[in-house]
Amino acid sequence: MSQKIFNTRTRKKEPFKSVRDKAVGIYACGITAYDVCHVGHARAAIVFDVVFRHFRARGYDVTYVKNFTDVDDKIIERANAEGVSIRDIAERYIRLHDEDMAALNVLAPTLTPRATEHIGDMIELIQALEKKGVAYCVDGDVFFSVRDFPAYGGLSGRNLDEMMAGARVDVNDKKKNPLDFVLWKKSKDGEPAWDSPWGAGRPGWHIECSAMSRRYLGDTFDIHGGGEDLVFPHHENEIAQSQAVTGQPPANYWMHNGFVKINAEKMSKSLGNIFPVAQILKLYHPEVLRLFMLQSHYRSPVDYSEDSLAEARQALIRGYSALGLLKETAAKFADDGKGKTPADDAGHLEKISALRARFDAALDDDFNTALALGCVFETARLINAVITTEKKMPHALKGKVLASAGQAFEHFRDVLGVFVCDPDVFFQADRAVEVRKRGLHADVIEDLIDKRRAAREDKDWSRADEIRAELAAMGVVLKDSAAGTVWSVE
RNA sequence: GGCGGCAUAGCCAAGUGGCUAAGGCAGCGGUCUGCAAAACCGUUAUUCUCCGGUUCAAAUCCGGAUGCCGCCUCCA
């Protein structure tokens, strides 16, 4: 099956046809570097990371560009408040952004250009817009004239008259039309400024993406992405700016991810419910957040809550348990390649390749990660079942089936970016997070386990159960095996 | 006021014209275990908010109702 993408512009799922054969250019709007990344940024980053990974897995040569806005009113405001330069602010939050993304196993995009590195490109673009007669300068400010771009509103499905009727636009005497937006902004004293044909100033917000996407991906590239809030006005304005100059739409497909709600409410500063990524990562292993995001389709809203993350954690544990079991038994059932492999009566190998195919098909279908994860968990179940119940299965065949399932999991891991840890390392990390979060003490727990071990050796079962109950009350779960007792946090 | 989205089991969530309505969490019964945990097996929606319509056939298409949500202002 070929790739399909829901295109915001047409509001339809469309077959994907790249501009260049077997190559794809993606531009996603990145952050404005004035504050730390929150869970909403994490979602957008994870969504487009999977898009990036899937195209690569499908053999495309992907150029993925994600910009940093490093000059903007909010950055200036923050710099003034702290008495530092906007560069200091931008550097700080870009660094923190990179740390968060690395923790979330979000791959670095191919290119991460910054607005201030492309002021020249922006000025050129604005001059071209002036030449085309769709931009006008008033007293050092340059505006885009929406009336002179007939296609305005095409992405967001609005028309100018309707928007005028809404009348929720700020009044600005300088503008010919209230919906005109700024391309270049005259700088006041003390504000960062660059020389331009219109005097000292700085770029408007939208122009940077038009300039940078064109520079790195060309006049028309494949996919432009971002959060759904960017549809209007940001992306609408980008189209206007780019298309007015080149005569071509800047991107063929527009992808927008849905929002993250917090306990069923909109995340907003006024509600005080902004969850920074770094804060969440103190409470959960990074893959928990990643899995949580991927369990819903990227266009649906997701509702972040303690409970939903806890559920995602249990699901992650389920997957890692299967991988742990696989690792434990790998040596035992290793297929040495000698001798012949008996027939696979139960059809396990066929099932595994079918799951792989279904997984890929799910992602081909507008990046349906939720459906793809279903395949991942079915594979986990198959691994568990083969190891624990198929007693009569010949070792050579078992080894072959498990190796095949392991390879499938590696593919899932590469595309979704979850289940990337060694299972032992994961369980250790997860337990450390839970212990810290619940204020438990590992040494106390281990001391109790030691006492229980002594009781069990004396066959003092009631004492052993007493200790088990005591630990259970703390949320500590014990697992006894021939090798000893291991513990985890429920 | 304008534009758009969503409504599927106790919860989360796929599925958008026709095989048994994925998967996860939670629950229940069984196997295993000194007891547990994990795992496996079985089970939990004759039905997809409601009302009409189209069709041989609809959760899926159309019309209407109700409820919830987003955007239109900086915002992933």
Image (spheres, rainbow, N blue to C red):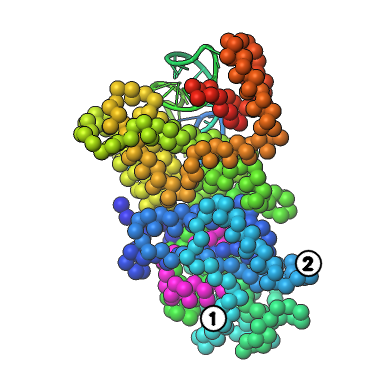
Q: Residue at x 63, y 80 (%)?
A: A184
Subunit ID for the residue under disc 2: A
Q: Secondary structure at mark 2?
A: helix
Determine crowd level at label 1: few under 14, some 14-19, many 20+ residues with C-alpha closer than 10 A. some
Q: Nearer the viewer, residue A387 or A274?
A: A387
**Span of residues in magenta:** A208-231
**Tag on residue A82?**
2
- On the rendered image, what quadrant is the C terminus of chain A found in? top right
Q: Is residue A240 visible?
A: no
Residue at position x 49%, y 72% in the image: A213
Judging by the rendered image, the residue that carries numbered circle 1 is A121
Tell me which amino acid carries mark 2.
Glu
Element class at badge 1: helix
Dividing the picture into quarters, in which one does residue A22 lie? bottom left
Magenta-drawn stretch contains A229: yes
> Disc 1 marks which amino acid?
Asp
A347 vs A220, left or right, is left
Residue drawn at the location 41% of the way across and 40% of the way down:
A376
Crowding at dot 2, Cα within 10 Å, few <14 / some 14-19 / many 20+, comes out as few
Report x, y in % for residue A431.
60, 36
Q: Residue A396, image x and y in percent?
A: 28, 32
Nearest to viewer (mark 2 / mark 1)? 2
Res A277 label: none
Whether residue A419 can be seen here:
yes
